[in-house]
Image (cartoon, rainbow, N blue to C red):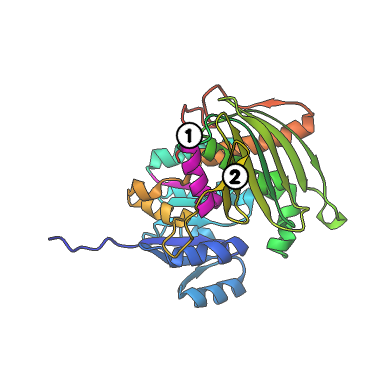
C-alpha cells in the first residue's frame, strides 16, 4: 500500500489589501493541500503583520522575486486591476498556476492572451469570482440546472453596497479609471455578469447601459452606479443594476421561467420558488469549515481533482464577464446597444457553455 502523501501546493499571495486579508489568507490557511509559502507587498507593515499572523517567512516587496523560484507552485494575484495582466503573464510564463482577482484584466485582449498562455503552459488559470461558492449561489445553480423553473425568459439582478470606501477605506485606486479599468461595472458588474452566465449556462448576446458618476468630488472619475439591460443567446433578457451608492449590502436576483420563478438573495442567504401564487423556501446548506470555496477549487484543479474543482471560474469565464462589463461601458459612452462576440462563442472565440 502506497502511503505517500502528496506535497502541499505552495502558494505566493501577491498584494495584501482587504481581499487578501479577509478572504484569501484565511481560506488558503484552512484549505487542505495548500501552503501559504510567500507574501508579496509594497507595504512592509502588512508583510510583518500578516507574515507573523500566518507564520510565513518568505516576504518580498515585488512579485519578480517569486515567479522564478522552484519552491513556489502558484501565484494568487490581489493587486490593482491594471497590474493583473502583467503579473499573471509573468507567472504563467514561468510555469506557475494562477488565481487572479476579478476582473481578470482591464483589457479584453490581455484576458484572451492569458487564457491562451495558460493552455500553452498547461497551467491552471482561475479568476476569483467567489460569489459562485456561497451556499445560496450553489443551491440556486442546482435549482436552475435541474429545470425546476423551466427555461428562463427574464431576470432582474441587483448588487450594491456603500462602495470601496466602506470595503477598503484607503484604496483610493478604485476611483482611478486607469487603474480599475472603469468604475462600478469593473468592480461589482463583473460579479453579477459572471453569476448570470454561470446560472443560465449561456452567453450574453447584447447589452445597453447607463451610468451616473460620483456623489463626492473626491471620488470623481469612475461611474458609481450603472443600470444595464442584457440579452442572452438562448432568449433570457433582463436588468442588471450595480451601485456604490447603497447604504446596505444587497445582492439579489429574480428569475422568471416558463414553469415557475426563483428568487435568490445572496446577502440574506434566502432562496425561494414561486409558483401558482405560492412561495416555497428552498433549503440552503449551512456554510462550514469544509464548504466549497474558490481557493479549494483552485488547489483541486492543480491536483487534477476535477470533481472538487467544479464551479470555479476559469480564465475564459473571467474573460467573458470582462467582455460584458467592457461592452456595457462602451454602450454608456456610445449610448447604444453593443453586440458581443460571435453566436454561441465566448470571449476567446471558443464555442462552450459555462461549467456549473
Estimate the x, y position of residue 97 in percent, counting from the top left: 42, 51
- The numbered dot on residue 147 is 1
Q: Residue furthest top?
A: 343
Q: Nearer the viewer, residue 104 or 254?
A: 254
Q: Nearer the viewer, residue 192 or 187?
A: 192
Q: Nearer the viewer, residue 328 or 44?
A: 328
Q: CA distance from mark 1 to mark 2?
A: 17 Å
Estimate the x, y position of residue 166 in percent, counting from the top left: 72, 62
**One can see residue 338 in this view:** yes
Q: Which residues are magenta?
A: 123-145
Q: Nearer the viewer, residue 78 or 31?
A: 31
Q: Residue at x 51, y 76 (%)?
A: 53
Estimate the x, y position of residue 7 in percent, counting from the top left: 30, 62
The tag earlier along the polypeptide, 1 or 2, is 1
Element assignment for label 2: strand
Question: In the figure, 287 relative to 90: above or below?
Answer: below
Label 2 crowding class (10 Å Cα cut-off): few <14, some 14-19, many 20+?
Answer: few
Q: How many marks?
A: 2
**Lateral position of residue 22 relative to residue 97, left or right:** right
Is residue 28 on the magenta stretch? no
Instruction: Determine which quarter of the picture holds residue 296.
Output: bottom left
Q: To which residue does mark 2 refer?
A: 279
Q: Residue furthest right?
A: 217
Amino acid at each position: 500500500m502506497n502511503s505517500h502523501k502528496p506535497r502541499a501546493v505552495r502558494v505566493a499571495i501577491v498584494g495584501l489589501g482587504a481581499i487578501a486579508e479577509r478572504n484569501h489568507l484565511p481560506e488558503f490557511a484552512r484549505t487542505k493541500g495548500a501552503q501559504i509559502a510567500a507574501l508579496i507587498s509594497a507595504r512592509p507593515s502588512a508583510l510583518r503583520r500578516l507574515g507573523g499572523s500566518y507564520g510565513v517567512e518568505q516576504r518580498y516587496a515585488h512579485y519578480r522575486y517569486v515567479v522564478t523560484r522552484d519552491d513556489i507552485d502558484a501565484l494568487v494575484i490581489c493587486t490593482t486591476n491594471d497590474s493583473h495582466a502583467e503579473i499573471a503573464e509573468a507567472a504563467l510564463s514561468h510555469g506557475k498556476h494562477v488565481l487572479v482577482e476579478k476582473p481578470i484584466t482591464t483589457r479584453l485582449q490581455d484576458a484572451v492572451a492569458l487564457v491562451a498562455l495558460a493552455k500553452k503552459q498547461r497551467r491552471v488559470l482561475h479568476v476569483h469570482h467567489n460569489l459562485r461558492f456561497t451556499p445560496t449561489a450553489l443551491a440556486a445553480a442546482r435549482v436552475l440546472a435541474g429545470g425546476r423553473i423551466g427555461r428562463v425568459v427574464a431576470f432582474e439582478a441587483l448588487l450594491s453596497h456603500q462602495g470601496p470606501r466602506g470595503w477598503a477605506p484607503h484604496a483610493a485606486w478604485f476611483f482611478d479609471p486607469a487603474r480599475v479599468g472603469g468604475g462600478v461595472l469593473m468592480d461589482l458588474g463583473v460579479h453579477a455578469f459572471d453569476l448570470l452566465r454561470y446560472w443560465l449556462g449561456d452567453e450574453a448576446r447584447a447589452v445597453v447601459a447607463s451610468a451616473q458618476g460620483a456623489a463626492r468630488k473626491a471620488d470623481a472619475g469612475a461611474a458609481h452606479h450603472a443600470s444595464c439591460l442584457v440579452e442572452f443567446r438562448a432568449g433570457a433578457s433582463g436588468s442588471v443594476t450595480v451601485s456604490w451608492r447603497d447604504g446596505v449590502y444587497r445582492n439579489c436576483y429574480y428569475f422568471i421561467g416558463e414553469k415557475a420563478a426563483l428568487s435568490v438573495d445572496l446577502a440574506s442567504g434566502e432562496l425561494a420558488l414561486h409558483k401558482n401564487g405560492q412561495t416555497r423556501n428552498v433549503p440552503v446548506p449551512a456554510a462550514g469549515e469544509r464548504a466549497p470555496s474558490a481557493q479549494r477549487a483552485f488547489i483541486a484543479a492543480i491536483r487534477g481533482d476535477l470533481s472538487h474543482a467544479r464551479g470555479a471560474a476559469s480564465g475564459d469565464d473571467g474573460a467573458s464577464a470582462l467582455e460584458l462589463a467592457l461592452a456595457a461601458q462602451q454602450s454608456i459612452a456610445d449610448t447604444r446597444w453593443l453586440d458581443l462576440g460571435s453566436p454561441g462563442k465566448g470571449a476567446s472565440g471558443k464555442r462552450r457553455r459555462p461549467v456549473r
